[in-house]
Image (cartoon, grey):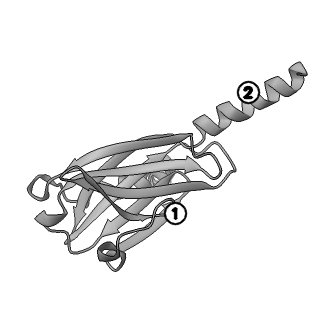
Amino acid sequence: MNPTIGIAVLLTVLQVARGQKVTSLTACLVDQSLRLDCRHENSTTSPIQYEFSITREKKKHVIFGTMGVPEHSYRSRTNFTSKYNIKVLYLSSFTTKDEGTYTCELQLSGQSSTTSSKNVSVLRDKLVKCEGISLLAQNTSWLLLLLLSLPLLQAMDFISL
């Protein structure tokens, strides 16, 4: 094998393995909906397949995703958004019957042997409210802009600290 081709294949495999690693899975409550934030690395241009599931009584139930078939009972209760490095799932009408271990699993399209996942145990009475967390955790650009503009606003006498 040509050494150049070998190095190119190795770099591609490393990019594939690194390109879809789940870095965190968090759960919080928005009104009566469970919100799952699945953060991941995104250093590849390949499409990322995903799956949210819950394990209860040692049985896996697919809630939403592109890898498995979601169970009918969850289809009408889910709302999903995806950005560059985060996938967010909302499960409405969350009750104690929905408690269990939630999993976010990612894999690159066509790479079924290379998956990455994280779990979070969810109990209704232990969940924190999402307000206050989501704005800072998801989009800090407004905060950075505010902090950077404070000296300018001070210099123009719009504010005094």
Residue sitting at 8 percent across and 57 percent down?
Answer: 125
Q: As displayed, is residue 44 above or below residue 131? A: above
Tell me the amino acid under the disc marked 2.
Leu
Q: Position of residue 143 (x, y in %)?
A: 43, 52
Residue sitting at 35 percent across and 47 percent down?
Answer: 25
Say whether disc 1 or disc 2 marks the residue closer to the N-terminus: 2
Q: Secondary structure at mark 2?
A: helix
Q: Which residue is mark 1?
A: 66
Q: Which residue is mark 2?
A: 10
The reply to whether residue 150 is in sight is: no
Which quadrant of the view contains residue 1? top right
Residue lying at the far left in this picture: please name it.
Answer: 125
Q: Position of residue 150 (x, y in %)?
A: 45, 50
Gap between marks 1 and 2 measured at Cα: 27 Å
Residue sitting at 24 percent across and 57 percent down?
Answer: 28
Which of 8/45 is in front?
8
